[in-house]
Image (spheres, helix red, strand yellow):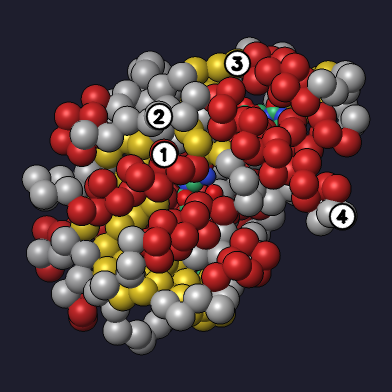
Amino acid sequence: MRILITGGAGFVGSHLSDRLLGDGHEVIAVDNFFTGSKRNIAHLVDHPHFELIRHDVTFPLYIEVDAIYNLASPASPIHYQRDPVQTTKTNVVGAINMLGLAKRLGVPIFQASTSEVYGDPEVHPQPESYWGKVNPIGPRACYDEAKRVAETLFFDYQRQHDLEIRVARIFNTYGPRMAADDGRVVSNFIVQALRGEPLTIYGDGSQTRSFCYVDDLVSGFIALMNNEAGESGPVNLGNPGEFTMLELASLVLDMTGSKSKLEHLALPQDDPKQRQPDISLAKSVLGWEPTVALKDGLARTIEYFDAQIKNGGN
Ligand code: NAD
Ligand code: UDP
């Protein structure tokens, strides 16, 4: 199949490109390089089945493909808050453009939604049936609300136009090819530890997240896209192992052997206090569950950043 990946030069998009090419598909990656990088896909540029198009998904795209994975959107709070209006446009107008493309072609389309649709959740762990608690006017709203509208659009295109949709709610995912300056917690802590700089703990560090290794996430994407039961989602994809930020910091310090200190900074507004996916639906319908433990995934990620730093890449 010829498969379009929007956000294909990003962290997750580049791993998805690798997997789909490995499975024998053709991949067309579309990206405007807002947070992605040519370095993430440099190894694919000469691949006979890979094509890269610099394009902003807020503008229409005319192209012929057999399936679409819509990943275009900054994902890190510091990046999606840098130009909040553009974040909403990318997620809403971008979704409309990609849904329009899928409708014209009559092809399936996958949406990279997020656990942020649950906001600062009052239900723990979060099942797909929970409607969430999102501040509609806070600094995270440009991302959270735009991803919620995108879900609405996907389900309206399904109801109104009979489109084949797949919606994944992704929980915090990490791994090689996150940008060193990405601002998300795993890359921040690893890069800080390797450079001997203080690890920046926002607030008291008691807030929790559940971290999924990128290879597991990509397997979940493909299981959802190809599932024979016709499950559209939304389906939670993430690793239920839940850790406080202090636990994560101490694990990173142990594993890097770093002498870095901890530095407490202010907790960002509306920062969710706890987050853990209920993955019963993914397990039962897709037969999917993560296989990489945090320690093993961190070891691979530390190795990646260590090599980047030694090569002067970061
Ligand atoms: P990323 O920032 O590394 O990748 C996003 C990519 O989208 C980048 O290459 C960026 O340049 C591109 N992009 C942004 N705006 C665009 C536009 N207007 N037109 C074309 N391309 C554009 O982030 P990621 O972690 O790889 O996230 C991929 C997707 O998964 C995003 O939609 C994100 O919201 C979703 N997601 C990721 C996580 C996670 O933990 N990694 C969690 C929840 C949801
Ligand atoms: N965080 C932190 N130090 C950092 C970066 C993030 O303590 O250097 C915290 C942040 O406040 C949040 C958690 O780590 O509670 C996860 O943040 P991230 O930006 O990775 O993703 P989020 O789940 O908030 O979108």
As measured in the structure, the alpha-carbon distance from the residue carrying label 3 to the one carrying label 1 is 21 Å
Image position of 236 (left or right of 90)? left
As measured in the structure, the alpha-carbon distance from the residue carrying label 3 to the one carrying label 2 is 21 Å
**Proximity of marks 1 and 2: CB atoms separated by less than 8 Å:** yes
4 or 1: tag closer to the N-terminus: 1
Residue shown at the point (40%, 29%) measured from the top left: 291
Q: Quadrant of residue 41?
A: bottom right
**Kind of residue indicated by mark 3:** Thr
As measured in the structure, the alpha-carbon distance from the residue carrying label 1 to the one carrying label 2 is 7 Å
**Kind of residue indicated by mark 1:** Asp
Tell me the element at label 4.
Answer: loop
User: Residue 21's x, y, as percent?
Assistant: 40, 65
Frontmost residue, 174 versus 72: 174
Asked if residue 93 shows in the view, the reply is no
Disc on res. 312: 4
For label 3, the residue is: 244
**Proximity of marks 3 and 1: CB atoms separated by less than 8 Å:** no
User: Residue 304's x, y, as percent?
Assistant: 69, 44
For label 1, the residue is: 216
Image position of 185 (left or right of 280)? right
Tell me the element at label 3.
Answer: strand
Q: Nearer the viewer, mark 3 or mark 1?
A: 1
Residue shown at the point (46%, 29%) measured from the top left: 292
For label 2, the residue is: 291
**Kind of residue indicated by mark 4:** Gly
User: Residue 75's x, y, as percent?
Assistant: 56, 49
